[in-house]
Image (cartoon, rainbow, N blue to C red):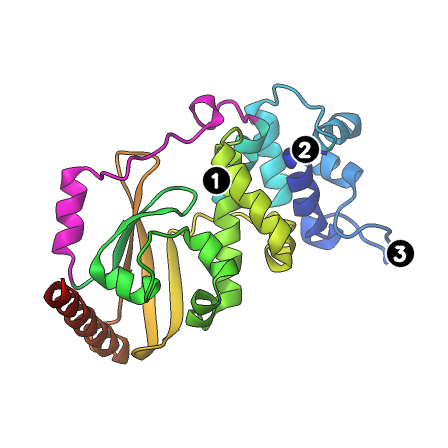
């Protein structure tokens, strides 16, 4: 079964006949959620045709069929877009491969990040490689790390990063849901496959979340942190898309007048002191 079939099966497994508006008479059911024939009925396609889709044998699925399946499965807009990407892997991105973003960011983005001194901000690739971060983002998430990391790998494999997130389980699910979308968008990209393969091998928690087939853009997220230097810190994450499709800016803000704002200012002051000491030593 290919990724399209796995996604379809996972989405119909979460529905029951009553929710879908089908009659349910209390009979014992051998499978969770809707049966294939029930979903086919709701989507207005033949059972044999739908079965071929789940078996990875469907070719050139029409927009009308994809829309009908999305309605029958009660997919949200993000899940609907993911369904289309899985059904048409060669159209989701040129060649199905993400273009490698140079570490030298455009000057305009460099100026923007430099001017956002009071706001943690990082430039990231779709696979969550940190391409650049300003000192405050480094102080929040990098701690004593000098190299630019992959945030997904850190969240699952780096103990200090895991300890940083009070809401680690929610963050982990969000990160995996985003990586699911990236994998569908760039099915031929070796970097995506390598990252997923590595995490599937070494992290049972990642493997369990990956098998759920949930998808999310992760454009907005509330990060609840316990920072080793300043304690409790709640950061509101927002993603800013750029003209470069393989580059996004991730910003983190706090509630004005909150304890988190005080903690973030303190962390910024500590980061400046650390930078001054490094300059003095050098």
Using residue 185 as the reference point, say whether residue 200 is left or right of it. right
Residue 91 falls within the magenta-colored stretch: yes
Residue that numbered label 2 is attached to: 2
Residue 99 falls within the magenta-colored stretch: yes
Q: Quadrant of the N terminus?
A: top right
Taking 109 as reference, is 26 above or below it?
below
Residue that numbered label 3 is attached to: 28
Picture residue at 85% right of the left edge, 55% below the top: 25
Asked if marks 3 and 1 touch (Cβ < 8 Å), the reply is: no
Q: Which mark is residue 182?
A: 1
Q: Earlier in the sequence, mark 2 or mark 3?
A: 2
Picture residue at 35% right of the left edge, 77% below the top: 228
Give the CA separation, mark 1 to mark 2: 16 Å
- Dot 2, how many residues are within 10 Å of its Cα: few (below 14), some (14-19), or many (20+)? few
Asked if marks 1 and 2 touch (Cβ < 8 Å), the reply is: no
Please state the horizontal and vertical placement of residue 161, each as a whole percent of the image: 43, 65
Please state the horizontal and vertical placement of residue 35, each as a whole percent of the image: 79, 43
Among the 4 quarters of the image, the one containing residue 146: bottom left
Instruction: Give SS at disc 3.
Output: loop
Among the 4 quarters of the image, the one containing residue 258: bottom left
Marks 2, 3: nearer the viewer? 2
Magenta residues, as a range? 88-117
């Amino acid at each position: 079964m290919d990724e399209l079939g796995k996604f379809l099966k996972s989405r119909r497994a979460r529905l029951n006949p009553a929710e879908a508006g089908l009659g349910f008479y209390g009979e014992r059911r051998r499978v969770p959620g809707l049966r294939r024939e029930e979903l086919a009925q709701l989507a207005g396609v033949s059972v044999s045709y739908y079965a071929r889709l789940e078996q990875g044998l469907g070719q050139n699925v029409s927009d009308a069929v994809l829309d009908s399946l999305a309605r029958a499965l009660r997919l949200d807009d993000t899940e609907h877009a993911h369904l289309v990407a899985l059904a048409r892997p060669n159209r989701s991105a040129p060649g199905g491969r993400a273009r490698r973003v140079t570490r030298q960011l455009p000057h305009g983005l460099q100026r923007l990040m430099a001017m956002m001194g009071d706001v943690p901000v990082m430039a990231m690739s779709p696979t969550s490689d940190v391409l650049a971060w300003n000192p405050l983002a480094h102080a929040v998430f990098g701690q004593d790390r000098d190299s630019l990391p992959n945030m997904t790998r850190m969240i699952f494999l780096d103990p200090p990063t895991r300890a940083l997130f009070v809401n680690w389980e929610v963050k982990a699910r969000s990160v995996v849901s985003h990586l699911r979308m990236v994998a569908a968008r760039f099915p031929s990209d070796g970097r995506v496959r390598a990252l997923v393969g590595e995490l599937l091998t070494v992290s049972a928690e990642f493997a369990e979340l990956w098998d759920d087939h949930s998808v999310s853009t992760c454009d907005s997220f509330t990060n609840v942190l316990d920072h080793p230097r300043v304690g409790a810190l709640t950061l509101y994450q927002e993603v800013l898309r750029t003209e470069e499709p393989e580059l996004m800016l991730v910003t983190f803000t706090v509630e004005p007048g909150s304890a988190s704002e005080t903690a973030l200012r303190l962390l910024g002051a500590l980061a400046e002191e650390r930078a001054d000491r490094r300059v003095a030593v050098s």
